[in-house]
Image (cartoon, helix red, strand yellow):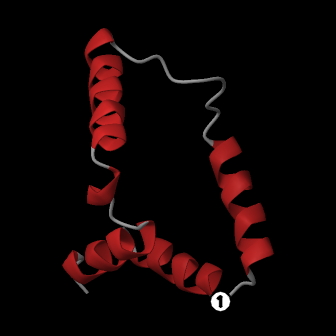
Amino acid sequence: MTKQALQLQELAMKLPPAERYELLVALWESLGLQGEAELSAEELALIEQRLADHRANPQDTIPADEVFKRLRNRRPA
């Protein structure tokens, strides 16, 4: 990201959650993306396989907060 974008991100992270959500929605809508994304047959098959794997082995699930923690620890400062 540019220096300006990093400064905006830093400011945005200081906003209350409700205002950050409103900002998120405004930014998303500014991209002009409408409707659902089209998935290929391969992507749909992968989703179905992963869902089946999860249903067969729910104990292997990692909570979202743990996933985000791991990702934050991998991200360069």
How many residues crowd around disc 1 within 10 Å: few (fewer than 14), some, or many (20 or more)?
few
Pick the front one: 77 or 3: 77
Q: Position of residue 33 (x, y in %)?
A: 61, 31
Which quarter of the image is occupied by the N terminus? bottom left
Residue 4 drawn above or below residue 11: above
Q: Position of residue 11 (x, y in %)?
A: 61, 85
Name which residue lies at 73% across and 53% down: 26
Instruction: Describe residue 41's horizontal placement relative to residue 4 as left or right.
Output: left
Name which residue lies at 40% across and 78% down: 3
Total labels: the figure holds 1
Which quarter of the image is occupied by the C terminus? bottom left
Pick the front one: 7 or 29: 29
Residue 73 found in image quarter: bottom left
Label 1: element kind? loop
Residue 55 drawn above or below residue 40: below
Kind of residue at badge 1: Lys
Residue 34 drawn above or below residue 76: above
Residue 41 found in image quarter: top left
Q: Position of residue 72 (x, y in %)?
A: 31, 79
Instruction: Describe residue 24's horizontal placement relative to residue 4 as left or right.
Output: right
Q: Identify the residue position indicated by label 1 in the image.
A: 14
Residue 65 drawn above or below residue 58: below
Pick the front one: 51 or 64: 51
Name which residue lies at 65% across and 33% down: 32
Outermost residue to the top: 41
Instruction: Describe residue 29's horizontal placement relative to residue 64 as left or right.
Output: right
